[in-house]
Amino acid sequence: MTPTMPPTKTEHVIKRIEPEAPLIDVMGGSARWEISLHKHGLVALVDVMPRMAPQGQTADFAIVQAARVSYGAGTKKVHEDRGLIRYLMRHRHTTPFEMVEFKFHVAMPIFVARQWIRHRTANVNEYSARYSIVPDRFYRPTVEEVRKQSKGNRQGGTEPVDDASAQEFLTYLERAEKHYHDYEHLLEKGVTRELARIGLPVSVFTQWYWKCDLHNIFHFLSLRLDDHAQQEIRDYARAMFQLIRPICPVACEAFEDYRLHGIHLSRLEIETIKTGQPLATDNKRENAEWEAKKPRLGL
Ligand SMILES: Cc1cc2nc3c(=O)[nH]c(=O)nc-3n(C[C@H](O)[C@H](O)[C@H](O)COP(=O)(O)OP(=O)(O)OC[C@H]3O[C@@H](n4cnc5c(N)ncnc54)[C@H](O)[C@@H]3O)c2cc1C
């Protein structure tokens, strides 16, 4: 028994309740779990809420614990917890997933950070290039990784561009990276860091601490693991998913089953499946999207 703290005149009594089962660290006692990528990049999990879980359980327990406030204690066996989490995911009862939080330390190029920062539900604290000197680190793909602009998808491409154009692109990046020497030189001459930095390219690395709850991380992942997202941010999203999966495996499996690998069907698409008639729209993009879904439905 932990002793109960004696109250002062203005304070209440704090009861310290012992856990029913011994608690374990969901990160197994590690200071951080880190994945390196893009030569200078990293995604590191630095903390989780709940950090401690009853022995034999994962952080999934916090989702169930919160959900049972609304659904009542009911039965408490592990396989029933799994069923409850999967039910919550299917029925978009999202708030219990907000009870789990993750804090990451991420280093990524500024063009990735610009896309990432659009996710407004996280708490972010970024490296200050007004206060500190920007390190000499740039994102540079390999020749094979330089992609050719797709004709169908105006946002990017997946095929490699020809070798000569890839080489030319890398030379162009090299020239941009050389601005770093001017940056250092101008700092030495006394130009402020906040101004000197503005000539650096968006391939330069930044870093931040990024804290977000599981519901909003799933939203981030559903958008940034998708084929439509830029390859580079997808690499970071994949690393993030790999880090959170062992912490709350049941919720992550439900996310994969019902959201990530599920398909949303429109009313028109459902009609087409039922009647065998063409999609009732002449919108080219909508028809192309339907054509892309068909093989996944075995049609
Ligand atoms: C493939 C792809 C292409 C994109 N292209 C572009 C582009 O060309 N130009 C561009 O500007 N952006 C672009 N974006 C960014 C996109 O429009 C969103 O800003 C980004 O994906 C964040 O999504 P979100 O707002 O849903 O997420 P979050 O900011 O994390 O918000 C999560 C959810 O919270 C709610 N929410 C948060 N803040 C508010 C608020 N203030 N008011 C109401 N509801 C709120 C919404 O329901 C929202 O879906 C692109 C994103 C993707 C994935």
Image (tube, rainbow, N blue to C red):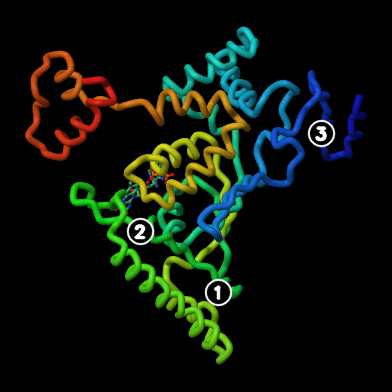
| Residue 202 at x, y percent in the picture | 42, 67
Is 64 or 227 nearer to us in this picture?
A: 227
| Residue 215 at x, y percent in the picture | 50, 34
- Residue on which disc 3 sits: 12
Query: Does the Cβ of the disc 2 residue fall within 8 Å of ligand 1?
Result: no
At mark 3, the secondary structure is loop
| Residue 90 at x, y percent in the picture | 42, 20
Q: How many marks?
A: 3
- Residue on which disc 1 sits: 130
| Residue 105 at x, y percent in the picture | 60, 52
Is 63 or 33 nearer to us in this picture?
A: 33
Cα distance, mark 3 to mark 1? 46 Å
Q: Residues within 10 Å of mark 2 (few under 14, many from 20)?
A: many
> For this view, does 142 lie left or right of residue 128?
left
For the residues carrying marks 2 and 3, which lies nearer the camera in this image? Answer: 2
Is 52 or 252 nearer to us in this picture?
A: 252
Which numbered tag is attached to residue 146?
2
> Mark 2 or 3 closer to N-term?
3
Identify the amino acid type marked 3.
His
Cα distance, mark 2 to mark 1? 32 Å
